[in-house]
Image (spheres, rainbow, N blue to C red):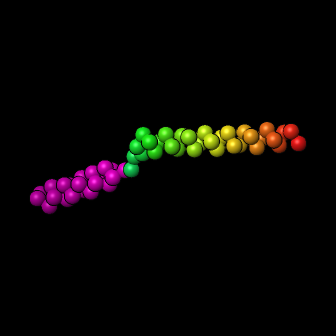
Amino acid sequence: MKKLILMLAITFSTAAVFTSCREEKSGVEQAADDIEDAADDVGDEIEDATDDME
């Protein structure tokens, strides 16, 4: 019985360690990513517009 409780405790601890180590982006990093995506979208739209003119 003691080994069963010990194994369950080890399993729970391992699961807690791996789920708590997720990397989350800060507000600044998220804003930078949003700006980069918007700039890429604008660049794509400009390329499409110039292709349509030719």
Question: Does residue 4 appear in the picture of this structure?
Answer: no
Question: Does residue 25 appear in the picture of this structure?
Answer: yes
Residue 3 as seen in the image, left or right of residue 32: left
Residue 19 as seen in the image, left or right of residue 33: left
Specify the farthest residue to the left. Answer: 2
Q: Residue 28 location, x and y as percent?
A: 44, 42
Q: Nearer the viewer, residue 24 or 32?
A: 32
Q: Nearer the viewer, residue 23 or 7?
A: 23
Q: Quadrant of the N terminus?
A: bottom left
Residue at 31% over, 49% down = 20
Q: Residue 53 location, x and y as percent?
A: 86, 39
Residue 15 as seen in the image, left or right of residue 35: left
Residue 35: which quarter of the image?
A: top right
Most common secondary structure along the magenta stretch: helix
Q: Residue 15 location, x and y as percent?
A: 29, 53
Residue 14: which quarter of the image?
A: bottom left
Verify whether residue 9 appears in magenta: yes
Specify the farthest residue to the bottom. Answer: 3
Verify whether residue 34 appears in magenta: no
Q: Which residues are magenta?
A: 1-22
Residue at 21% over, 58% down = 10
Q: Quadrant of the C terminus?
A: top right
Considering only vertical position in the picture, is 18 above or below 33? below
Residue at 15% over, 55% down = 5
Residue at 33% over, 52% down = 21
